[in-house]
Amino acid sequence: MTPKESLRYRGLSLSIFAGAFVFGIVMASLGALLPGLVKKIGFDKAAAGALFLMMNFAMLVGSLVFGPICDRFGFRVMLLLSTSLVGASFLSLASAGSYAVIAGSLVGLGLGGGALNGGTNALLSDISPEQRGAALNRLGIFFGFGALSTPFFIGALRDRLGLEQIIYILGIFSLIPLALYALIRFPAAKHSSGFPRSQFLALLGNPALYLFAFLLFFQSGNEFTVGGWLSTYLPERFGIDAGRASFLLAGYWAAIMVGRSISSVLARKVKPEVMVLGSVLLSLAAVAGLLLAPSQKFAALAVVFIGLGFAAIFPTTLAQAGGTFAELSGTAFSVIFVVALAGGMTCPWLVGKIAQSHTVEAGMGIAIFNCAMIALLQVAIWIRNSWAQQKALGKY
């Protein structure tokens, strides 16, 4: 890589990391802002739950549409549109005077956030062919910073600035990647002369795509389940107060960020298949440790190791998919993200159903099953890749 190419790569990477940071803000914003919005407008818990459903569904739609557009027209258009939509949605939310405006603003955040997340991951995968695993693990760190900093920022400044001013500031943050996307040179569109219908159909008919997608269905289910139910499980199982449970939840997310920092280094030396299998085995042991923990201290340690185990699985699997489907990476990532989000929505719901009739502890057992499925799917991917390599060498 020449000095000029290196400088361009660094600038483009910076803009991608800024986008991931903003997506982290989007993901954490509704949960952090919800009490203030309820107080401002006044609506019940059922209506609040509907907001999460609408935003998540919009995020799923955004994840579905970004890929074909990026493959056909390039990444700049989609990233400019998605960040603009996020910024406009925050501004609309800040001045919202009714539930309908809040709902519309959150749908905009979901659409823009889903497309922004998919676009940044796919673009970074494309420009980092020699170090996809390391690059995508680093991207996860910036997402984590955005998600972690948002509740702390809102909690620290809510009384001083007020809800409206805080949301305006969040909207201004989204202008940072918007400015970068407008100024930085992007790679040319892969299929500017027309979308390759035959390749598209071949991609959708490739079983390998669904091995990656359903691996991340179970992994996303695990991350959403632990992140969503941990602060309920710990008080029920160990009598931990809500404040301490929140700190342990923050420790879980912090452990994921630390784990991705470590994984970004290990990815240069360790095969992605080995990285995922090692991570899922650690996750399996840590989840079992949490469910069987004899004390609060043991449970807290298990929470940290769950975060460390989860850290590398999602980005490293995306890196494998990005290498396998490099010609239509955007479209492939669209399919993968939609399936993954479906897992993130379904698994916590199942935990709630099980917890209603049994206990939260019984519901959390879903994470054990998910870990087993991740390991099984990664082995299947490894066998398929080995077979494909042997076939390419003429040995089959």
Image (cartoon, rainbow, N blue to C red):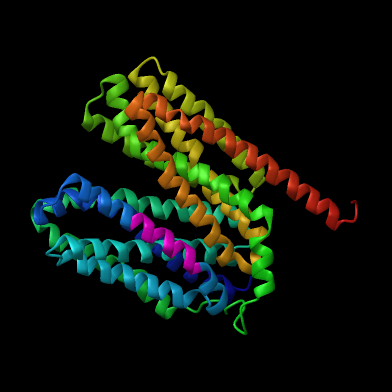
- Residue 330, image x, y percentages: 55, 66
The answer to whether one can see residue 263 in this image is no
Residue in view at x 63 percent, y 62 percent: 204
Specify whether residue 63 is painted magenta. yes
**Left or right: where does residue 91 sit relative to residue 287?**
left
Q: Main secondary structure of the magenta part?
A: helix
Which residue is farthest right?
A: 395
Residue in view at x 46 percent, y 62 percent: 63
The answer to whether one can see residue 27 in this image is yes
In the rendered view, would you say 181 is above or below 246?
Answer: below
Residue in view at x 56 percent, y 35 percent: 280
Q: Which residues are magenta?
A: 55-66
Which residue is farthest top?
A: 294
Quarter containing the N terminus: bottom right
- Residue 387, image x, y percentages: 80, 48
Q: Of residues 143 and 321, which is closer to you in this image?
A: 321
Which residue is farthest bottom?
A: 193
**Left or right: where does residue 44 sit relative to residue 20?**
left
- Residue 104, image x, y percentages: 25, 65
- How many numbered discs, if any? 0
Specify whether residue 26 is painted magenta. no
Q: Of residues 61 and 22, which is closer to you in this image?
A: 61
- Picture quadrant of residue 91: bottom left
